[in-house]
């Protein structure tokens, strides 16, 4: 293909060199004359392993050109990538000025050329900035720009390897014809291609980087905790990382509801107590309970804000397929709603007061002794509820919700949201 890339910074130069090495004809565009000169001389304007060689090879093959004239580039190309900088403002907000200016210049150039083009945003931007880009393109060149996104996941130092051997290629596109064009660009890459709506694709990049920052902070806090106890933190975390079923996996990484049970809260308190004994400040780990509490507060607020008095709760144990009620966030919701004067009914096929024994029974007797008056034996007993809270996805729940004439607060994020109340139950929130 013939490709243009606006912005010859880190992402732009790496993308240009790697695409040219695949046999595509690439035009790089930048306002910096030094970058243009350096690339056209067969060198790299940034330091990155192997990049200078890639640029030199592409120049010798006649597959890479740099220019300051965006019109010159666009008249030669089928796809235009935008990889300009989106720096932070002092308040943390992204500054989209470079991106919006690039969109303006692309749109004006396409109007002059009288042609349409697929424009792919590679820059890291939030969905709100993409909407601004769409507005700019539609105002200046209505109908001429097919705007989509292709987030990059390049790490400095290994960017070429990351570009050529990614875990996946992510496209944010809505039009099938554009999807076909972009997929063909990555056909010879040995990695799967996934397609999401543009807004969701953009946030995958942010979710990834925030999680990487979270991992670094978590490992450092565990490391300092180990160090204070005279323990080898590297040995601890090395073994931690060997667990690919839970620790390094997709488990616990889907949006849902708060954590609870007999293990996580107890062990988290023990770690925080150990940190206090050692005069250690572990802000990340220390914030976990506060974050969990906010999840519960949001759920209760949604129910109260709906104005419903008769409330049904599906699921009471801290997670499905267990009868353990200890520190269950659903028990906490039940307690708070009762305190707000709600008439509550609870359905949980795994919870039977006649079977509860030991610590589980002691907890219920102490925290929610009136449970026996709340439990109902079937979903049908919730039919008169004005609002139903879905905590667990038991057999029959989906069918019950389809027939129920009630508002639904879905804490699982697994039930579809009807488009109107007339279609059945509807969700105040898809997920937390």
Image (spheres, helix red, strand yellow):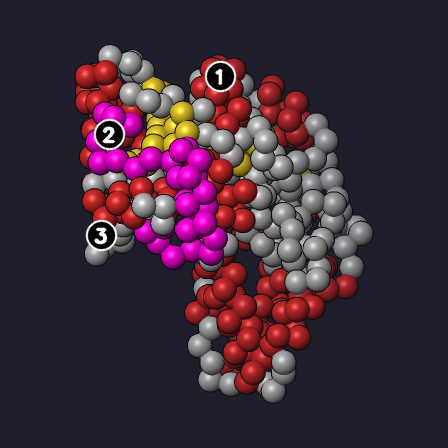
Residue 273 magenta: no
Which residue sits at x=65%, y=73%? 236
Q: Pick whichever, 239 or 192, lies toward us.
A: 192
Seen from this angle, which residue lies furthest front? Answer: 60
Name the residue carrying label 3: 89
Asked if 337 appears above or below 421 in the picture, the reply is: below
Q: How far, Cα to Cα, is label 1 from label 3?
A: 36 Å
The residue carrying pointer 3 sits among few (fewer than 14), some (14 to 19) or many (20 or more) residues within 10 Å by Cα, namely few
Mark sitting earlier along the chain (2/1)? 2
Q: In this image, 130 relative to 419: left or right? A: left
Which residue sits at x=46%, y=46%? 54
Q: In this image, 73 relative to 325: left or right? A: left
Mark sitting earlier along the chain (1/3)? 3
Whether residue 371 is visible = no
Numbered disc 3: secondary structure: loop
Q: Pick whichever, 17 or 185, lies toward us.
A: 17
The residue carrying pointer 2 sits among few (fewer than 14), some (14 to 19) or many (20 or more) residues within 10 Å by Cα, namely many
Q: Pick whichever, 47 or 152, lies toward us.
A: 47
Q: Position of residue 131 (x, y in %)?
A: 29, 30
Residue 70 got which mark? 2
Q: Position of residue 114 (x, y in %)?
A: 24, 12
Q: Which portion, as a residue range, is magenta? A: 44-73
Q: How far, Cα to Cα, is label 3 from label 2?
A: 27 Å
Q: In this image, 266 relative to 120: left or right? A: right
Name the residue carrying label 1: 176
């Amino acid at each position: 293909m013939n490709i243009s890339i606006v912005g010859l910074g880190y992402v732009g130069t790496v993308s240009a060199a790697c695409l040219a090495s695949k046999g595509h004809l690439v035009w790089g565009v930048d306002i910096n004359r030094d970058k243009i000169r350096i690339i056209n001389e067969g060198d790299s304007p940034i330091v990155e392993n192997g990049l200078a060689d890639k640029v030199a090879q592409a120049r010798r093959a006649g597959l890479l050109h740099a220019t300051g004239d965006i019109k010159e580039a666009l008249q030669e190309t089928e796809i235009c990538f935008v990889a300009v900088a989106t720096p932070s403002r002092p308040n943390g907000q992204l500054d989209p000025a470079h991106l919006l200016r690039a969109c303006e210049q692309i749109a004006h150039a396409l109007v002059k050329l009288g042609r349409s083009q697929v424009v792919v945003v590679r820059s890291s931007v939030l969905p709100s900035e993409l909407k601004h880009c769409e507005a700019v393109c539609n105002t200046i060149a209505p109908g001429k720009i097919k705007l989509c996104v292709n987030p990059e996941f390049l790490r400095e130092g290994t960017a070429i390897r990351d570009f050529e051997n990614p875990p996946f290629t992510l496209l944010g596109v809505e039009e099938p014809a554009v999807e076909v064009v972009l997929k063909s660009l990555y056909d010879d890459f040995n990695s799967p291609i996934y397609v999401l709506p543009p807004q969701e694709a953009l946030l995958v990049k942010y979710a990834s980087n925030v999680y990487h920052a979270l991992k670094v902070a978590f490992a450092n806090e565990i490391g300092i905790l180990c160090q204070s106890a005279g323990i080898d933190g590297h040995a601890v975390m090395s073994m931690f990382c060997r667990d690919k079923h839970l620790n390094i996996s997709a488990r616990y990484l889907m949006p849902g509801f708060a954590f609870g049970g007999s293990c996580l809260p107890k062990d988290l308190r023990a770690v925080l107590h150990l940190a206090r004994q050692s005069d250690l400040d572990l802000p990340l780990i220390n914030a976990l309970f506060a974050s969990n509490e906010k999840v519960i507060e949001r759920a209760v607020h949604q129910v109260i804000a709906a104005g419903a008095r008769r409330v049904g709760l599906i699921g009471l144990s801290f997670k499905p397929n267990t009868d353990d009620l200890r520190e269950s966030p659903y028990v906490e919701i039940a307690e708070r709603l009762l305190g707000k004067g709600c008439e509550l009914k609870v359905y949980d096929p795994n919870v039977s007061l006649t079977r509860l024994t030991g610590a589980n029974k002691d907890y219920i007797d102490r925290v929610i002794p009136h449970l026996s008056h709340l439990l109902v034996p079937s979903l049908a007993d919730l039919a008169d509820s004005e609002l139903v809270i879905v905590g667990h996805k038991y057999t029959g729940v989906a069918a019950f919700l389809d027939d129920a004439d009630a508002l639904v607060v879905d804490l699982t994020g697994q039930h579809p949201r009807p488009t109107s109340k007339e279609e059945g139950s509807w969700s105040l929130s898809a997920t937390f």
